[in-house]
Image: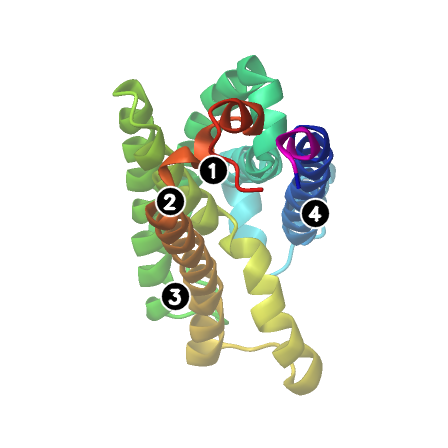
Amino acid sequence: MTNQDVVTSRPAAVHGSGAGRRRREWLVTAGLLALTLVPVLAGADRVTQLASGGPVTPDNHRFFAMPVPVLVHIFSASTFCVVGAFQFAAGFRRQRPRWHRIAGRVLVPSGIAAALAGMWMTLFYPLPASEDTLLNTARLFFGSAMVVSLTLGLVAILRRDVGSHRAWMMRGYAIGMGTGTQVLTTLPVAVVAGRPEGLENALLMIAGWVINLLVVEWILRRRSNRSASRPRDAGVAPGLLVQAGRVAP
């Protein structure tokens, strides 16, 4: 293959790989939106119940007695999860940097508000019969971890540390998306054996947070290993490599 062949063939290859990468990114975004669909719909149903005044049951009477915290949690968590899903489309972020900055200004306060409201409800709402102390302890732990992650992500970007910013924001988002994954961990058990309660319910709920965080840490480790093994010229445009005579025939 001559240098001319490389010049003419490389752009098509790069374009093809770019199109495939964009397709994968949007599939990830679509998957995250699908994962958050059930919690968002459940939150919308809760808001409708509160607005209409009922029906009041032993499981939801605490929300009617003090609706503000649950409303803050629902609206801020829904915003955080839906807007955050689009941050995983890297091409979309690069093409619209202003949107990315505006979205970040929405994501951090909405995520922190969702976590704080969730912790407030954990501490001050009466404990439902189907839940136990272990689950409440886990909610406080992961809620605190979410606030810390988002705060560290904000501090990192103010220092222009993009890598740390991305890692901490992904961790915070993983915790926020725990509710979506908890549908997947609890629903099969509920279908087969009835609604889980007590220790079983707590472990299944905790699994949702843990699974999300493990996936994020795997992604971050994979990216780190890929960056460490990338050749020095990996970030140089193919045309420049040809001109410099560094493309093998």
Residue of label 1 = 69
Label 1: how many Cα within 10 Å (few below 14, some 14–19, many 20+): some
Q: Assign a secondary structure to mark 4.
A: helix
Q: Earlier in the sequence, mark 1 or mark 2?
A: 1
Rendered location of residue 178, percent (x, y) = 50, 55
Q: Is 247 covered by the magenta stretch?
A: no
Label placed on residue 94: none
Q: What span is in magenta?
A: 2-6
Check the image and report above or below for 87 versus 191. Answer: above
Residue 21 is left or right of residue 202, and the answer is right
**Mark 2 and mark 4 residues within 8 Å of each other at the beta carbon:** no
The alpha-carbon separation of the residues under discs 1 and 4 comes to 33 Å
Check the image and report above or below for 24 versus 243. Answer: below
Query: Which circle, 1 or 4, is nearer the viewer?
Result: 4
Closer to us: 155 or 54 = 155
Q: Looking at the picture, which amino acid does disc 3 mark?
A: Leu
Residue occupying image coordinates x 70% and y 50%: 34
Residue of label 2 = 227
Check the image and report above or below for 196 versus 133. Answer: below
Query: Which circle, 3 or 4, is nearer the viewer?
Result: 4
Q: Which of marks 2 and 4 is nearer the N terminus?
A: 4
The alpha-carbon separation of the residues under discs 3 and 2 comes to 38 Å
